[in-house]
Image (spheres, grey):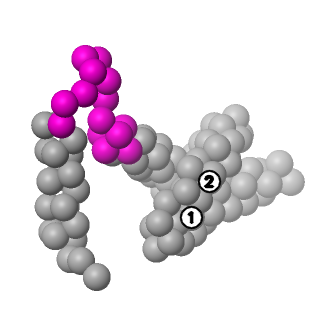
Amino acid sequence: MRTTSAAVRAALAGCLLALAAPRPVGTVPAVLLQARAEDDWSAEFEAVCSRTQDAMGLTSDELRALVARCDRLAPRLAALDESRRKVYGKRLQQCRDLYEFVLRTREKG
């Protein structure tokens, strides 16, 4: 198993090799596309789950929107490697469950 710094070095080396490889003008190396796609799910994950502290102060529409964003993000996390899929999938489910709970509580009262 690689350490985090070794994994980072390996990823960086892959990016550098991909950039140095000859390719048609205007194309983006697959390694960079993968890195960009990974950043996209990560940024969305942080944006969605960072609102849990304020869940009680959010409007019902905001809560519904966050639940929908969680639902759209879940399939993207399912495509990750096993350990990240388990960790981030569980955390996303907990965020979604909290938003859903607050929404149901508010609608009952």
Q: Nearer the viewer, residue 7 or 73?
A: 7
Magenta residues? 21-34
Mark 1: give few (<14), some (14-19) or many (20+) Cα within 10 Å: many
Frontmost residue, 79 versus 49: 79
* Vertical comparison of 97 with 23: above or below: below
Residue located at (21% from left, 41% from top): 18
Disc number at residue 89?
1
> How far across and how far down the image is residue 51, in percent?
49, 49
Amino acid at the residue labelled 1? Gly
Circle 1/circle 2 CB separation < 8 Å: yes
Q: Which residue is mark 2?
A: 74
The extreme bottom residue here reads: 1
Dominant secondary-structure state across the stretch colored magenta: loop
Say which amino acid is labelled 2.
Ala
Residue under the image location 25 percent in, 17 percent down = 25
Q: Is residue 9 magenta?
A: no
Residue 45: give x, y in percent of width and height: 47, 50
Q: Is residue 98 visible?
A: no
Q: Dividing the image into 4 quarters, which one contains the N terminus?
A: bottom left
User: Where's residue 64, x and y in %?
Assistant: 71, 41
- Classify mark 2: helix, strand or loop: helix
